[in-house]
Image (spheres, coloured by chain):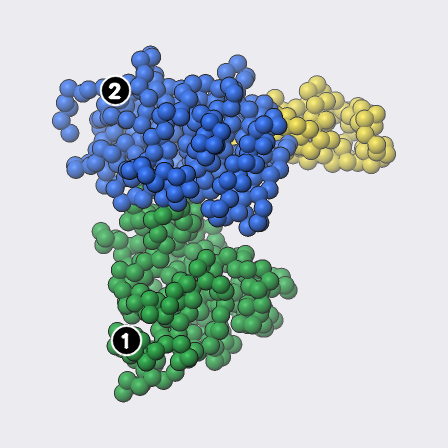
Chain colours: A yellow, B green, C blue
Amino acid sequence: MINDKIKFVRNKRLLASRMDDEIVMMHPESGKYFALNPVAARIWELLETPHNLQEIVSKLLTEFDVTPETCKAQVSDFLENISEKKLIDKSE
Amino acid sequence: MKKNIVWLASYPKSGNTWCRVFLANYLSKSDEPVNINHLNIGAIFSSRQIIEDNTGFDISELTADECDELRSFAFEKWAENYDENAFVKTHDAFVTLPSGENMFPVRKTKAAVYFIRNPLDVAVSFANHLGTDPEKAAEKMCENKFCLAASKKKYNQQIRQRLLSWSGHVQSWTTQNNFPVLVVRYENILENSEREFQSILQFLNIPYNSENFIKALKYSNFENMKKAEQETGFKEKSPACKTFFKVGKSGYYKNILSENLIQKIINEHFACMKKYHYLSNSGELII
Amino acid sequence: MDKKMATTYTYSAFGINISSEIKIPEFLPSSGDIQVTVSYGEVPKKLDEKIINGFRFQISADEFIIRYKPWAAFYVCNGNKIIIQPEKDADENDIKTFLISSVIVMLLHQRGLLPLHASGIKVDNKAVLFAANAGVGKSTIALDLNRKYGYPLIADDVTVVSAINNLPVVYSSFPSAKLWQDSIEMLGLLNKDLPFIRKDVFKYRFDNRPAFFSGILEPLLIFVIENGDKENIEIQEIKGVDKFNVLRQHIFRAKMINEIYAVEHFKILTQLLKSVSCFKILKHNNSNTLNELSVTIQDTIKQW
């Protein structure tokens, strides 16, 4: 589980571009492509500057109709997922 | 080097698709019949797309002979995507390039199953396929230079295929010794599809699974294939004919071909018809 | 081959000025500063640092060798030089045909441009592109829209896109189309005595100089055309990441270059797609739909 000491920020080497309300990304070293849906794209936007889990969840709760528990669980999963794929960097 | 290409070779209208429907269902994990328009079983040796994708060349600026030079490389590379049997359907005769080099990727070939059918029935079925009369179809079956997809008029997803005459086609595949060939008579599949399909699996060292076998036998039954075509159409059907899965019976030619035409086909293909038991030793028609 | 006192011709195509020892009547003449030279000479046997070793071709980031046996070998390097080594008895028309299609496109890739497998027309002062796989009818639809509505043509097979100051631009290619016999019939060009692109290759070359616009344009719309089996023509706007995924399939010779230029392509393609709308058109896989297709496209253009 991700604790709030960890801050996340975009991997600056990634190429990313908004396509309507989604984002397409490419990892220049691996050559892999990724797509973010509208909610994920919003999180990506926030991660231009370092954010921890709680900060992201708080922002999303004001914008999307979702319960705090669901939101936290899903954002947490998402962060782990894209962190594994090296789309974001972590710092303590 | 991995040898995993398996040819499903035949003159057109000789049971090739039937076997592919069987194999597709046998190898499918689903309980539902495999859609005949998505026979997820390998490729066709004349596929323009596979050749372009695996060589990078633009075929539309090449001559038919130049395209043939790309085929061996393209299919060797394509076959690397498969761990086991990479099935390739072909109506090409087993010919070499004008240079004498292989047109077929023989060094990656495991084996071939060659389907043969009474040329008298082929003539009837082929006429339907080409949207012409049996006389014209029979003429083509005697022509050494006959090719499929040779139209110069428009873009074609298939590249030109050299067929030789019917006998020439049979001989090209059955007398080559680059890899083992199992010859399967269409009439034998009609008579006992269970036995014939089993022997194909055995020949190719594909493990036997009775549940899959029964399922595949049922879904590749002629009536079922015909019904599937009525429901969804069949993309491999030539635009010139109305239905791909037609009659399918053996000896049907007797109702269609004239005495003259029958004699003409026999004269032309006598030796080959005798060898594969469409004529008795004394030259009498068996079927 | 003897090094004759080479005559050179100067041309413009894909927004580039080219000096060439081989005559290319399909290209437009030019007098601008030369950026690319095409000459006869010796092609290296192989590349030292190849990334892709394909069938009769090799590619590294800045170099490309391809052999069209038995006609000629081509060497393309640094986005500014093409060397042709013809075989004995090679036909100059064959060499030129390979040069102006597959070979020159590798030079475009090396120059960091985005060559799309698309034809194009000029609408007002903007570019409208038609991307499609071979055989779907890219050339035919562009020519038909020109014939019916008078839109100038800007490309037949390859359309080059670039980004200047983060804004996408489209360069016209050259005024010549390659057509199958059935397209010639549909377009009513039967009375013209057109030559084949090569001996024994049954595609015709059609010079469309009078209808051609040469220059740089801002892109407006992209239509991606596909064959389907539905009776009616279907048109649908493509949005989001789908847009990127669909258009990436239409990068010219994508299969040959694999992902060597992926970073450049990503940058230009996303710039392009941010400023244009994309429509996917499904048409029936037969010839009778050309008229309906043109009308559908014209309606969409007019609404824009």
Count of labels in the image: 2
Residue furthest bottom in the image = B282
Residue B142 visible in the displayed image = yes
The residue located at (25%, 42%) in the rendering is C199
SS type, badge 1: helix
Q: Residue C54, percent across and down?
A: 36, 40
Does C162 appear above or below C85?
Answer: above
The residue located at (32%, 61%) in the rendering is B163
Q: Chain of mark 1?
A: B
Residue carrying label 2: C9
Does B269 appear above or below C56?
Answer: below
Does B174 appear above or below C206?
Answer: below
Q: Residue C64, percent across and down?
A: 34, 30
The residue located at (49%, 73%) in the rendering is B247
SS type, badge 2: strand
Judged by depth in the image, the label closer to the viewer, 1 or 2, is 1
Residue carrying label 1: B264
Please state which of residues B263 and B175 is positioned toward the viewer in this rendering: B263
Q: Residue A4, percent across and down?
A: 79, 26
Indicate which disc residue C87 carries.
none
